[in-house]
Amino acid sequence: MRKEIIVIALGGNAILQPGQRGTIEEQLENVDIACTHLVEIAASEKYEMVITHGNGPQVGNVLLQNEVASSLVAPMPLHACGAATQGTMGYVIQQTLANRLRAAGLRHYITTVVSQVVVDRDDPAFEKPSKPIGPFYGWGEARRLRRDRGWDMIKDSGRGYRRVVPSPRPLEIQERRIISNMLESGEIVIAVGGGGIPVVREKDRSLRGVEAVIDKDLAAERLAEDIGAGLLMILTDVEQVMLNYGRVDEVRIDSMTAEEARDYMREGQFGVGSMRPKVEAGVHFVEAGGRRAIIAALNQASQALEGKAGTTIVP
């Protein structure tokens, strides 16, 4: 009997902590801590596991490197930067998790799949860029970049100006069949890092990378749906989804139905740039046939799978 497929989405904090420079040593140390919790899940031998991850800080660093070295080396487009960080971060997770599994006496067949995610060329997001990326600039430099490169720039967080790019919805994972085949052969797969490489399909069915960023939680949901996963687990830096977050009447949610979650979103309960995409991904997943979605803290992953921690979304 085939094991249940679980897609585990690691938050960016699992790889790079706020205030860190992003050295490979820092990332290896952070991932090693994260992998202790993934090993607990792998040890149960109940699941075929796919791991996704964020890449915001890492792409930001690559974009900054682009700018600093632009007089010496041709800058890479954003979709190529995403591909590069998928490879680098996949390597870090792949090696670290294999070492942890080996030390625990468990199988350690792990593969990273640099993943393309198809989006609609007519997605309204392309008309309204909204996702800030890369370094902060002063007003003069922001004005020059808008004029010379055609970048959309916004004032962000009181720290200066940043480039904003479209964030279209993911339609399908191009490598979904490869990922499914790998799972059937016993591999643990790392895929769709940072939301995947956004591509559009041309009239001749060829693919072309576009300057955009796909929300990593919605991409993880798309992956889970495409490969027939029964569970979607989004691991972050908070223990549960909360109503009235940060207020004196804050309420933790242990479990909610998709309908209840939609009601909460209509009330504006969850932050657009933080918890809302996670809840939205969970709702889409269970409405598309997934058994349950879980949002939990990384250090409580095993307990959350047992229903003893985190927030569970059910149909």
Image (cartoon, rainbow, N blue to C red):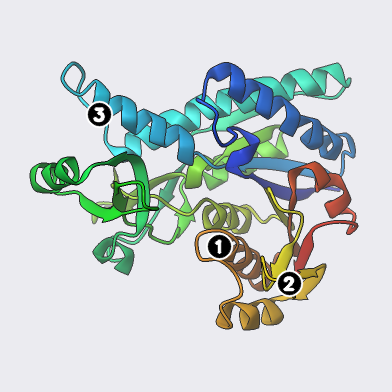
**Residue positioned most to the left:** 147
Note whether 213 is above or below 36 in the view shown: below
Q: Secondary structure at mark 2?
A: loop
- Quadrant the C terminus occupies: bottom right
- Circle 2 residue: 248
Image coords of residue 113 (percent x, y): 53, 34
Mark seen at residue 186: none
Image coords of residue 301 (percent x, y): 80, 46
Please identify, in this view, whether the residue under mark 3 or under mark 2 is nearer the observer.
Answer: 2
Q: Is 154 displayed left or right of 176 in the figure?
A: left
Q: Quadrant of residue 53?
A: top right
- Circle 3 residue: 67
Note whether 280 is above or below 10 in the view shown: below
Please identify, in this view, whether the residue under mark 3 or under mark 1 is nearer the observer.
Answer: 3
Q: Is mark 3 in CB contact (under 8 Å) with mark 1? A: no
Identity of the residue drawn at 90% across and 54% down: 306
Identity of the residue drawn at 78% across and 69% down: 253
